[in-house]
Amino acid sequence: MASNSYLIVGAGVFGVSTAYTLIRKYPNASVTIVDRDAYNADSRVAASWDWNKVIRADYDDIIYCRLALEAQDIFEQDPLYQPFFHKSGIYWMCRTDYATQVVENYRKLGRKAQIEAVSVKEARKLYGGLFEDADYSDVTEVLVNKTSGWANAGDALKAVTKKCIELGVKYVVAETQSLAFNGGRCTGIRMRKGDTLSADKIILSTGAFTAKLLEQAAKASNKPEISAGGRIIAGGITTGMTQLDEESYKRFANMPVAVQSWNPTIVSPTRDRELKWWGQKIFKNTQNILGKRISAPPPESDYAQWKVAAPLKEDIDFANNIFYGKNGANWKMEKHRICWDAFTSSSDFIISPHAGAEGLYVATCGSFHGYKFFPVLGKYVVQMLEGELEEELAWKWAWDRERPDERLNAEFPRWEMRDLMGKQARL
Ligand SMILES: Cc1cc2nc3c(=O)[nH]c(=O)nc-3n(C[C@H](O)[C@H](O)[C@H](O)COP(=O)(O)OP(=O)(O)OC[C@H]3O[C@@H](n4cnc5c(N)ncnc54)[C@H](O)[C@@H]3O)c2cc1C
């Protein structure tokens, strides 16, 4: 059953995909997105706003493999997404049997693709020996999937948001400070400047800011049950870019996305000849928020994302070295950014009613892998809103469920940002 009004806080992939699904399903409904940044701003804090993101279905978890294939089909075929997708392939240096498991998942799902797990010896020769000098210590096999690739992430986000607005979605630029309640029901949001917006259903797709926002709402309304309570952790990672000269570009133009297990990744060159790297250190920023120790992005309105301390920049140099060794030694790294996302200890999303209030829903926690699902996230969020999510997904993405020990998750933020800032930055 449709509600008449929906308020979505956050215009990243979770929020925008939800708005797009709702407005097409219910053209007469009132659908409003509220975000601190304009959708076409030159700089945004959203993790989804980026030069590029990896689009792949290479998961050992068969559920995410299935959903990512569903999403990738839309990236390849839907005229709205298709201009932003590049099928460059992926080259993934695995230190477990990950590659074999991914190949097996494709087989179980009946999916035909140019995908294989190859030995290190064979892999070194591929792509004209582009990864010959990478660090292969402990690598057991390399996953090569020619059907994976990457997307111009920010451009795709902008295009889909624009489409939402054309279809009737309202886009409000404002910072949400808190939530409004009537008894046990969430009825709207309170914005920083004091105004309130109301709707039948309030959906939080606020990424890395979610735990902080819930804490602010819990305190302001005296409802401790609204807090995230350790379910959602803000994590940051450094990214950087290098622009290849014309000569090098010839060699790298057809480069696949490359991944070193666990974190360091390099995305194929953009049309501006830029390679994008992520470092290996994923960190929290634990701070005192209204008397509780909570990880959240820095308090600046731009999350201080462009202020990257020297030791964090070195993380990008490290990544360069383990892919290209001496070949990349002279590359100049630029455009360093700290990108913040919301994590759960299982790396599963939360797409669920919030157990603390009627009418309040959470749809976020991309856990550093959510972008690729952009074209299908809204479908599953709307199924959740309407109580139609298949049982397995409802359990996986639940607000309340048993969660694994974070120490078992290799990608979980382990560092504290303040310990990675270097002496000078801490003064
Ligand atoms: C460096 C990095 C690389 C990544 N690479 C990949 C990849 O290659 N492939 C992949 O699939 N995934 C990748 N991810 C993960 C992916 O980007 C995220 O999981 C996904 O984008 C999260 O989407 P979201 O909508 O939950 O949050 P976001 O995109 O962060 O959006 C949240 C929005 O909420 C708004 N907001 C927050 N608080 C408030 C408030 N109080 N008031 C108003 N607005 C608010 C913000 O302005 C923002 O626009 C990567 C993440 C990072 C950080």
Image (tube, rainbow, N blue to C red):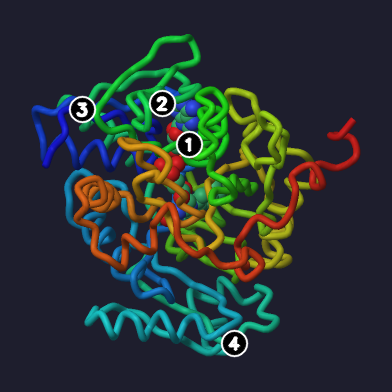
Task: Pick whichever, 257 or 66, lies toward us.
Answer: 66
Whether residues under marks 1 and 2 lie with C-beta atoms below 8 angstroms apart, the answer is: yes
User: Is ligand 1 within 8 Å of the beta carbon of the residue shown at mark 1?
Assistant: yes
- Disc 4 or 1, which lies upstream in sequence? 1
The x and y percentages for residue 232 are 54, 48
For the residue with label 2, is its CB less than 8 Å from the closest atom of ligand 1? Answer: yes
**Residue shown at 59%/53% (left/top)?**
277
The residue pinned by badge 4 equals: 140
Tag 1 residue: 46
**Residue under circle 3?**
5
Q: CA distance from mark 1 to mark 2?
A: 10 Å
- Horizontal arrangement in the rendering, residue 210 relative to residue 2 (left or right): right
Q: Height in image: 346 above or below 180?
A: below
Circle nearer the viewer, 3 or 2: 3
Nearer to us: label 1 or label 3: 3
Q: CA distance from mark 2 to mark 4?
A: 44 Å
> Judging from the image, what secondary structure is the residue with disc 1 in?
loop
Quadrant where the C terminus sits is top right
